Amino acid sequence: MIPGEAVLDAFVNANILVCVAYCCWFCMQKAMQKAGLSQFHGTQLKLLNGVFLVVLFAPFLALGFRTLQTNGVASQLNLNLSDMVVSYYLNGGFEMKASDLEGLIHARDTFILNVMTGTGVAAKAVIGVFVAGLAIGTLRLIFSVFCLYRIVANSYGWRKFGRVRIMLSDRTLVPFSTRGLWNYYVVLPSHMLGQSHELKVSLAHELQHVRQGDLEWEIILEALKPIFFLNPFFHAWKRQVEELREFNCDSKVLSKGIIDVRTYCDTLLSICQGTLRRDRAFVIAVPKVTLVTADRSSNWNNRPSMLESRVLSALESRPVRFQRLLFLTLLLPLVTALSITAVAVQRPGDWSQDRLMLSTVVNLERLDEINRLSTFGRIRN
Amino acid sequence: MKKKKSDLLTEVELEFMNELWALGEGTVRDVLARLPDDRNLAYTSAATILRILEQKEFVTSRKEGKSHVYIPTLARDTYQSRTLRDLSMKLFDDTPASLVARLLSDEELTEEALGQIRALVDRRLKNDTG
C-alpha cells in the first residue's frame, strides 16, 4: 500500500472506530443509568477517555495482532469482518447476488482508490469538502489559540505554585484554565478579588480540572476536531466529555466539604449570568476549560440546560464508593470489544480461500450472464 | 508578547483609585481602612489590586519601611475625561453633543444642576472667544 493510501485507510478505520466506540460507551452509560449508577460521573468520564485511547492506539493494536499472526501465534484465528461476512455468505447464511456482495466488500477499496486518484464526482466532492473543512478548522484553531494566548499574556500574575500560575484578567468574565507546554494557567476575572466566595469556588473548580487532566483531553479533542469534523459521533463525543468533566468536577469539589452546595450553585448561576455578555475573543479562544458556559441550545429543545443539570446534580450529589473497581470492571469489556473491532475493520491482507471462492462464484455468474445473451445481443429463451 | 495596557479601570480598581485620589497617596492598609466595613476584602487581595494598578501604570509606588505607598499617576479629572471619551465613542457614535443632549433630557436633572451646566458652557465659550 502506498503511504497516502495507508493514511486514508487508517483515517477510515479511525472514523469507524469512533462511531463504534461511542455507541458502545453510550450503551454502557445507559446501562449504568438503569443500574442507578448515574452519579458515577468520574467513572463515566474515565471510561470515555479510556475508550478514546483505544481508538488512538487502534492502528498499533491491529499491527501487533498482524505481527503475532505472522509469527505463528493464533494464525488460524481470522477476525477480519469482510472475511467473516464472505464465509457466512458461502455457508448459506444469507442470500444475495455474489457480484453485489463482492461490490459491497470492495466498496471501501473502491472509495479509497477513487479518492486517491480523484476519480468520479463523489470522490472529488469528498476531497473538496474535506480539504475545505480541514483548512477552515485548522485556521480557526490557530486563531483560537492565538486569542487564548493574548488573553493569558495580557493577564496579571497573582500566585504561582509548582507548575500552576494563577492569573487575573480584565478580559474575561468567566474563570477558566488552560495550559502551555509546561505550565498550567488558571485565569480569573480580576473583579473576583472583591468576591471571596466566588473566588474560592472558581479556584477550587479550576484546580480540580487541572488535577483531573481535563486540559490535556480538551487539547487533544480540539486538535482532532478539524480532522474529524465530518463525523457526527466525534462531536457527540466531545459534548459528552465536556458535560461529564463538569459534573465530575462539581461532585469532586463538593465532596471535599470545604464549599457548601448553596454557595457553589449561587456562584455557578451568577457567573453564568456574566457569560451572557459575550466577549467574542473569549468565546473563540480554545483550548480552555471554563467554570460555566451559557447553554443557549436548550431554548429550542426540551432538554434541560447544562447549568440546570449541573445544579440539580450538585444538589443531589452523594459520595460514591468503589469507583476504581467499577471502572476496571466496565473498561475490560469495552476495551475487548473495541480491540476486536479495531482488528476486524482492517482491510484483509491476502486472498483467503473464501474470497477466492466468492470471486469464482462471481466469475461463474458473469459467464452465465454472457451465455444467456445471444450473439446478436438478444436474450435467449 | 508586550502586555496591552488597559485604558479603563474595572469596577474594583475604580473603587481603589477613588480612595487613592481622595487620600492623595496611601498604603494598602490606608485604602482598606477607607472601604465600607461590609466590603470584607482580604489584605492580599487589596495588595494584588494595587499591584495590578501599578502594572497598568495608574499608580506608582515607593517603599516606606516594610510597606509600599501608592501614588496615583493620573488625576481624577483626566480619567473622567478619558471615560467620557470612551463612552461617547462607544455609545454615542463619537458625537459628544448626543451625550450632552441625553444628559440634559434626563428628567431627574434639577434646575440648580442645569444652571451649573449653563454657567460651565458660558465660561468655556467666553474662554474660546476671548
Image (cartoon, coloured by chain):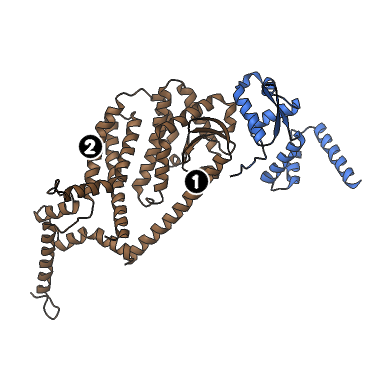
Chain colours: A brown, B blue
Query: Left or right: B121 with respect to A65?
Result: right
Q: Dot 2 corresponds to which residue?
A: A333
Residue B16 at x, y percent in the picture: 68, 28
Residue displayed at 39% across by 61% down: A128
Residue A230 at x, y percent in the picture: 37, 52
Q: Up-down: is A312 above or below A51?
A: above
The quadrant the C terminus of chain A occupies is: bottom left
Label 2: how many Cα within 10 Å (few below 14, some 14–19, many 20+): few
Q: Nearer the viewer, mark 1 or mark 2?
A: 1
Circle 2: element type: helix
In-front residue for pair A366/A11: A11
In-front residue for pair A236/A186: A186
Chain containing mark 1: A
Q: Which mark is residue A145?
A: 1
- The amino acid pointed to by label 2 is Pro
In-front residue for pair A83/B95: A83
Label 1: how many Cα within 10 Å (few below 14, some 14–19, many 20+): some
Q: Earlier in the sequence, mark 1 or mark 2?
A: 1
Residue A351 at x, y percent in the picture: 15, 59
Query: Left or right: A340 with respect to A128?
Result: left
Residue displayed at 29% across by 55% down: A9
Query: Left or right: A314 with respect to A146?
Result: left
